[in-house]
Amino acid sequence: MPNTYDKIIVLKNLEAVQKVPGMYVGCCEDGSALYHILWEVLDNSMDEFMNGYGNKIVVTLHEDGSVSVEDFARGIPVAYDKVEKKSSLELALTQLHAGGKFNKDNYLFSGGLHGVGISVTNALSARLKATVWRDSTEYSMAFECGKEVQEFTEKPCRSKRTGTLIRFAPDLKVFKNVTTYNAEKIKTKLRDLSFLSNGLTIEFVDEMGSASETYSGDTNISDFVRHLAKNAPLIADPIVISGESGKLLMDIVIQWLDDSSEEEICKCYTNTVYNSDGGTHLAGFRSSLTRTINGYIDAADLPKTMKVLLSGDDIREGLVAVVSIRHPDPRFSSQTKDKLVSDDARAAVEGVLSDKLMVYLEENPVPAKKIVTRCITAFKAREAARKAKEAVRKSDMKGSVGFLPGKLADCQEKDPDKCELFLVEGQSAGGSAKQGRCREFQAILPLRGKVLNIEKCEFKKMMDNEELTNLITAIGVGIGRQVDISKLRYGKVIICTDSDVDGSHIRILLLTFFYRQMPQLIEGGHIFIGQPPLYRLDHRGTTHWLKDDAALRKFVKEKKLNTSMIKLQRFKGLGEMNPEQLWETTMNPATRSMLRVDIDDYLETDKIFNVLMGSQVDLRKDFIINSAEFAKLDV
């Protein structure tokens, strides 16, 4: 074979992008790169607005699968370059590291820093056409896969408009798995940009069919946080921190959620470019937030019980924030700009936030106390969770049942996929269930009375509740962030309460617990609702089991029965059934009826739990009033 070791291949112009696109735009298989080439074009228009030019951008999804971005700013330069012997427009579209953003006289702030953005889009487009309006003239060029197919042309333009229109169709040979743009994802991007760009109107036009949108430009970064925290904000108005350090400008808005959510939402931007992996500005924000909150607790006139040292996790539980900086010379970890690495950004954010947040807390004692209380509650919950994790660890040691709750009647089977755990209401029901079950694969855990409503109680109180800690230990997966689904001891967890109002209440309390503390069990299809009958009806020597009053009325009507023809027994609770009856109607896999708990809409589910089970009475009252017409009362 010939020796090729001494041969070196030189990739010219846009060949490098086409050869290794992932280096410039990220993964081409999962769709991120497809959107990146659109964001590169959009960022150019955003840079123009950020530097004072143009107040409108139009993004259009066309019927032929192409997409366009049009602005009304200065327009890409078109002057002839004597050295390169090409127009500036052609250089911007075909040469890496060519652009106007290296000159700070043109752009004080810019999302681009390497001059490769729009040329990368051109390289990875099956076709691209650029149209520029400047000096009462319309200029245009067209390309296919980065190669010129329409030379630079110009013609007079009667209007005095200026700006740029880039229309391109992605090269499907590059973008294989995800090849079309999702309108909703683009709308989300444009909406977020409108929050960051007060005074900019952004229009989205979808020729493919979905509704078009206009973002009017009268919103701001505070509205952004209100939008993110629309579900139960802790304080009435978000905390707004604006300032500068040297040439670096920043806007920071902070809010917390007034619920049991542990998720931190913190969106970071540099020159309106979203940094999905955060970076130095995020690090500065987090360290300053932790130091300032702890400093306030130490200095403020607060009860001794509130004088604790909080961790960053305690403070950021339920946090909703947007950190947006304007940096004259940003540095990122990669061309995709996912992470800011400019060291000066950390120091700048830390300094401004520390000073101004402390002033806010001192001048606003009421919201400050709410914030501190929220953080201390998270601290207590985390301590309780640590103890709960230790209890679960002990219960799982070598499969030993020695640490399991004494009330639990466990099963013999060791394969979780074959095991079932019945959660039954009360000791009498537990007794019948224990006698009626199949010991091989069915376990019984009786629950005493109504468990806590964890939607409106502190985590520590939940962990002090014997019924819930027994349940946590029996299931074995842990709770909250500690859930490890691989340690699940029962493939089916069956809520089996009485068929009356109290039973329904206990059922929803348990569902609230599972949704908030073990959502993975619901997502994995492990939670079920048992359906024991409310009535036993004997007619002509045959027994019929009827689930509820509606089922009884329907049966009597269909059979045309009267009271003299039947023997009717109503079970006030599962404990009134003997073991054989409970097995036959509710526990026997061959004859029982069960409902699996699923979630179709997570946002709506979260809202319903918050309204119906949360601490805000006014929300629940409004829901009941608005839903009264749909209620069916059995009187």
Image (spheres, grey):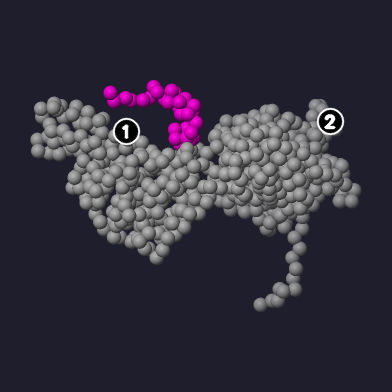
- Please tell me which of labels 1 and 2 falls first in the chain: 2
Query: Dot 1: few (<14), some (14–19), or many (≥20) neighbours within 10 Å?
Result: few
Judge left or right: residue 429 versus residue 133: left
Query: Dot 2: few (<14), some (14–19), or many (≥20) neighbours within 10 Å?
Result: some
Q: Residue at x 69, y 76 (%)?
A: 2
Marks 1,2: beta carbons within 8 A: no
Q: Can residue 20 be seen?
A: yes
Residue type beneath disc 1: Val
| Residue 614 location (% of width, % of height) | 47, 35
Judge left or right: residue 579 versus residue 467: left
Question: Is residue 617 placed above or below 388 in the rendered structure?
Answer: above
Label 2: which secondary element: loop
Residue type beneath disc 2: Ser
Does residue 631 show up magenta in the picture?
yes
* Magenta segment boundaries in residue numbering: 607-635
Q: Residue 501: which disc?
A: 1
Does residue 339 show up magenta in the picture?
no
Q: Which residue is mark 2?
A: 136
Q: Residue at x 57, y 44 (%)?
A: 305
Judge left or right: residue 209 versus residue 142: left
